[in-house]
Amino acid sequence: MIFVHFPIARSHFSPITSNGAERRILASVLGAVTCSIGTQYGVKMLVDSLAAAHVQIAAVWIAFATLAGLIVADNLLRRLAMYVGSFTWRGLQLGCNSGFVLITAAAKCLN
């Protein structure tokens, strides 16, 4: 119970998630947040390119492509975090159940 208040430290020592799933979830969530913040700058770039005195079509398309790419990356990274998280939770449940079976079996042997 030492790592209850330190989830990142727990991810280094947990036998259930030894494959680094928690680190993958953390990295994809941080990437999604970065893309989400970058989307605001993409909108600013698009508005600035449209509000210029001399509108250049290439600049508008570059700003639009940047904005669309950031939105797509944000959604994909969030979905990746949810996908990895669903298997991590399933593995955690299976690990707890097998541990419970072992404890129950050990208790029956002691009686």
Image: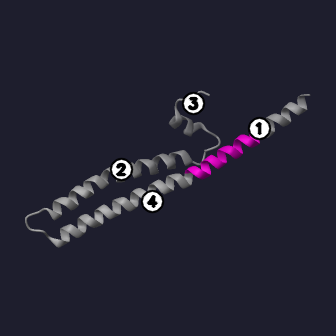
In the structure shown, which secondary structural element does the residue marked by tag 4 occupy?
helix
In the structure shown, which secondary structural element does the residue marked by tag 3 occupy?
loop
In the structure shown, which secondary structural element does the residue marked by tag 1 occupy?
helix
Task: Tally the numbered discs.
Answer: 4
Q: Quadrant of residue 93?
A: top right
Give whichever of 44, 80 is nearer the camera.
Answer: 44
Query: Which of marks 3 and 4 precedes in the sequence?
Result: 3
- Horizontally, residue 35 falls left or right of residue 106, namely left
In the image, which residues are magenta?
Answer: 85-99
Q: Position of residue 99 (x, y in %)?
A: 75, 39
The residue shown at (22%, 56%) is 44
What whole-number distance in Å separates the C-alpha atoms at marks 1 and 2?
A: 40 Å
Q: Is the Cβ of the residue at disc 2 closer than 8 Å to that at disc 3?
A: no
Q: Position of residue 46 (x, y in %)?
A: 22, 61
Task: Return the residue at label 4.
Answer: 76
Task: Return the residue at label 3.
Answer: 4
Q: Is the Cβ of the residue at disc 3 closer than 8 Å to that at disc 1?
A: no
Q: Position of residue 4 (x, y in %)?
A: 57, 30
Q: Residues within 10 Å of mark 2 (few under 14, many from 20)?
A: some
Label annotation for residue 34: 2
Q: Quadrant of residue 110?
A: top right
Kind of residue at badge 4: Leu
Kind of residue at badge 2: Thr
The residue shown at (49%, 56%) is 79
What whole-number distance in Å separates the C-alpha atoms at marks 2 and 3?
A: 27 Å
Task: Return the residue at label 1.
Answer: 100
Q: Is the Cβ of the residue at disc 1 closer than 8 Å to that at disc 4?
A: no
